[in-house]
Image (spheres, rainbow, N blue to C red):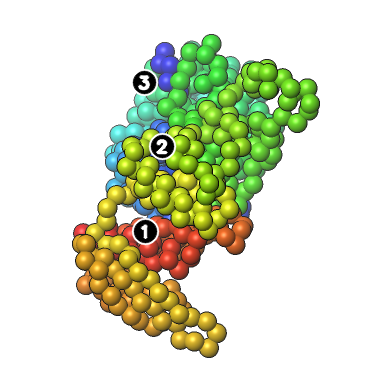
Amino acid sequence: MDDKVIIFDTTLRDGEQVPGCQLNTIEKIEVAQALEALGVDIIEAGFPISSPGDFKSVVEISKAVSNPVVCALTRAVKKDIEVAAEALQQAKRKRIHTGIGTSDFHIRYKIKTTPEEIIKRAADAVKYARKFVDDVEFYAEDAGRSENKYLAKVIEAVIKAGATVVNIPDTTGYCLPEEYGQKIKYLRENVPNIDKATISTHCHNDLGMATANTMMGIINGARQVEVTINGIGERAGNTSLEEIAMIIKSHHDLKLRTDINTKLIFSTSRLVSTLMSMPVQANKAIVGRNAFAHSSGIHQDGVLKNRENYEIIDPVEVGIRESSIILTARSGRAALNHRLELLGFNFGKEEIDDIYHRFLYLADKKKEINDEDIRILAGVVFQGEKSLKLDLLQVSCGKSLIPVATVGLKINGEVHFSTASGNGPIDAAFTAVRQLISKTVHLEEFLIQAITKGSDDLGKVHIQVEHQGKIYYGFSANTDIITASVEAFIDALSKIK
Ligand code: KIV
Ligand code: ZN
């Protein structure tokens, strides 16, 4: 049996369903790109028929990532499947995830039909989805409370209809680990064509057993796990990605592996937590504030003698700095490079020099530079030389003043200047930029975010502009929010060919 456990991330679908966790398209793209860097195999990007916003997000995520398979959820309904296929059109690798309830509760009281009719609808949905994509996953909703013998019949039928992955959700989080493991084992032993599909786990955490159940599923032969960052998801949440990735990495005895770059776990956790305004509980395994904090004297003494006395995971492995070395304006290149490496970046000397230069500039304005700042500084370098670059920005604004901005824009190496007024400093600066470029663009989305709460902190700006029916995305971060906005606008413009 293959030793690779496929990581199917549903932070942007099951996770995003949580009240208060909704993200806009730009934020979803940011999370999807972080998930791609983290090394997930599949990103469940949304449920396209559920809303125009979800549809748009699946379209944009399909364009924004290259390596992971992009997956869209549907019910076992033709229209859902058609809409999902349309949303996935631009994905390099795509999957439709369709399904229906298979427990007595769902058949009798939710869908109000017969077990035979469920099998027919399930197989028809898979067959229909296969007309659009080669990769079709089937979910048997509430499989945790479904009778094993009947579940086996459903699974056999959907594999025959073309399902490549069969998902066995413990939708209500009811199963005991032993019971869930036995369910997977039963399916492996009693579904004649099971070798033609991958079995997937999808466990909810209502009784705090999601991770244990997922592990029992893997031990009994599942090779895909459906997980979310920080374990967010419906009610008590889903299985958390970081827990499964680190269990597999720590337990060599299991002889399993994932493609997760565990050094990016902590930063991804914080990105999702910040964007979704969903704090991570302090004692959360792997990513909680206290996960590697030792408070009792006996433990501190033991850790100082040998870290492994009280730590089974080296915090560096999940991207947490091994000690609290604070980066400030007095830090050197070596400290900066060390932190970059902990965050999973590997740069050459010239790139480090460039980042260090930006780092000092930022450190002069902020007292401490945190990991999010470093990721942004590194991200700017990744983008390389651009055809358009902000060279100068001067704004005057204030109460009873007409906002005026002067912009110096480097276009293919030559600086051009323009001045304009507007209803605010950003509007004035954008108008000045527009006067220097020959293209007509419409601002589609404009999002300003403070990274943490300090007034000296970096502000991040995400922008989407439309030009001749196509959307272009721009990003920048700066302690000066007007500069960040203009840079993000120019970043988007520079991508128009
Ligand atoms: O929990 C569940 O059953 C689900 C399915 C839609 C896969 O989220
Ligand atoms: Zn779920």
- Kindly indicate the quadrant of the structure image that contains residue 39: top left
In this rendering, is residue 157 above or below 13?
A: above
- Amino acid type at mark 3: Lys
10 Å neighbourhood of mark 3: few (<14), some, or many (≥20)?
few
Helix or strand or loop: what does disc 3 sit on? helix
Q: Earlier in the sequence, mark 1 or mark 3?
A: 3
Please tell me how crowded label 1 is: few (under 14), some (14-19), or many (20+) other residues with Cα within 10 Å: many
Left or right of 241 on screen, residue 341: left
Asked whether residue 154 appears in the rendered view, the answer is: no
- Nearest to the eye among marks 3 and 2: give it: 2
Point out residue 459 in the picture as x, y percentages from the top left corner: 50, 59
The secondary structure type at the circle numbered 2 is loop
- State the separation of the CA atoms marked 3 and 2: 38 Å
Q: Nearer the viewer, residue 169 or 102?
A: 169
The quadrant of the picture occupied by the N terminus is top left
**Picture coordinates of residue 484 (x, y %)?**
43, 63
| Residue placed under numbered mark 2 in the picture | 345
Cα distance between the residues tagged 1 and 3 = 43 Å
Q: Which mark is residue 196?
A: 3
When asked about the image quadrant of residue 214, the answer is top right
Residue that protrudes farthest toward the top in the picture: 253
